[in-house]
């Protein structure tokens, strides 16, 4: 097993007034040659968007994008004709493929929106752009698979153009769990949204992360009530 710890305080930071961002990997004006990506995981931004503000219309191409609101709502509009509101408890996926333009903003006039936006390098370029979103109910002390590869999708999961699995879970204190990796050659990026836990000998607090690879599984035990995101990703 190999592993890398990503402490929350080492993330890149930016404050644009309307947007306060934390960058797990090199993004925008933040560049760290040791933080380019983890396997096919290219971006994990922890954004806080001020009321009534957001990202104007901008293009994407050949990228798989997942948005997970943690607090508040996100208004989405794109060149495919979708105009949606994504709420806390929902997950949004978008395959940019051959090219798509979209805007994202906080529709509230009083409350900030906090979301995770994750970019995954695609399995193949040039696919048709697509959009989907879904609400998920998490069962306490279990990981819920919310995103899968297209060839392994289920009735209650979203899918991406990549061999990746996104899992969300809410756990009580002193709860232990083992995550079994689905495919050989994959790694796991464990991101602590809230709480704290021990994972493979490493203590992780709120917004800390751990990348693990060359293993068949990872195990963790929570040391406080916790919410976590587990991303399984190809390492090649």
Image (cartoon, grey):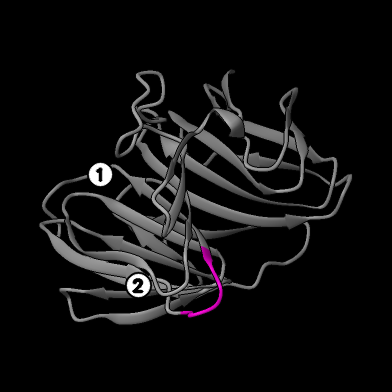
Relative to residue 205, is residue 154 drawn left or right? left
Q: Nearer the viewer, residue 51 or 118?
A: 51
Closer to the camera: disc 1 or disc 2?
2
Q: Position of residue 169 (x, y in %)?
A: 67, 56
Q: Secondary structure at mark 2?
A: strand
- Can you tell which quarter of the image residue 177 is in? top right
Residue 106 among magenta residues: no
**Quadrant occupied by the N terminus:** top right
Residue 111 among magenta residues: yes
Q: Position of residue 16 (x, y in %)?
A: 39, 50
Relative to residue 29, is residue 112 drawn left or right? right
The residue that appears at 11% across and 52% down in the rendered structure is 126
Q: Nearer the viewer, residue 43 or 28?
A: 28
- Can you tell which quarter of the image residue 201 is in? top right
Crowding at dot 2, Cα within 10 Å, few <14 / some 14-19 / many 20+, comes out as: some
Q: Position of residue 127 (x, y in %)?
A: 15, 57
Q: Is residue 128 visible?
A: no
The residue that appears at 54% across and 78% down in the rendered structure is 110
Q: Nearer the viewer, residue 88 or 128?
A: 88
Crowding at dot 1, Cα within 10 Å, few <14 / some 14-19 / many 20+, comes out as: some
Q: Which mark is residue 123?
A: 1
Relative to residue 232, is residue 143 drawn left or right? right
Residue tagged 2: 132
Report the magenta stretch's main SS.
loop
Tell me where the magenta segment starts and ends, as one range: 108-113
Tally the numbered discs: 2
Q: Return the residue found at the far right.
A: 174
The residue that appears at 48% across and 79% down in the rendered structure is 108
The residue that appears at 61% across and 29% down in the rendered structure is 7
Q: Secondary structure at mark 1?
A: loop
Q: Position of residue 182 (x, y in %)?
A: 51, 42
């Amino acid at each position: 097993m190999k592993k890398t710890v990503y402490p929350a305080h080492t993330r890149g930071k930016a404050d644009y007034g309307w947007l306060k961002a934390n960058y797990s990997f090199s993004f925008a004006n933040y560049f760290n040659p040791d933080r380019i990506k983890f396997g096919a995981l290219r971006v994990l931004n922890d954004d806080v968007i001020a009321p009534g503000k957001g990202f104007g219309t901008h293009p994407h191409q050949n990228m798989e994008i997942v948005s997970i609101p943690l607090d508040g709502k996100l208004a989405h509009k794109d060149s495919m004709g979708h105009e949606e509101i994504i709420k806390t408890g929902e997950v949004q996926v978008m395959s940019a493929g051959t090219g798509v333009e979209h805007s994202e903003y906080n529709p509230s006039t009083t409350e900030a929106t906090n979301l995770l936006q994750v970019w995954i390098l695609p399995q193949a370029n040039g696919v048709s752009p697509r959009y989907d979103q879904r609400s998920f109910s998490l069962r306490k002390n279990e990981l819920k698979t919310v995103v899968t590869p297209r060839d392994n999708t289920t009735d209650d999961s979203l899918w991406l153009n990549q061999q990746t699995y996104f899992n969300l879970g809410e756990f009580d204190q002193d709860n232990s769990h083992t995550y079994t990796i689905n495919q050989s050659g994959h790694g796991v990026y464990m991101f602590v949204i809230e709480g704290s836990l021990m994972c493979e000998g490493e203590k992780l607090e709120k917004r800390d992360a751990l990348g693990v690879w060359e293993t068949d599984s990872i195990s963790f035990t929570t040391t406080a009530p916790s919410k976590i995101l587990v991303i399984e990703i190809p390492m090649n």
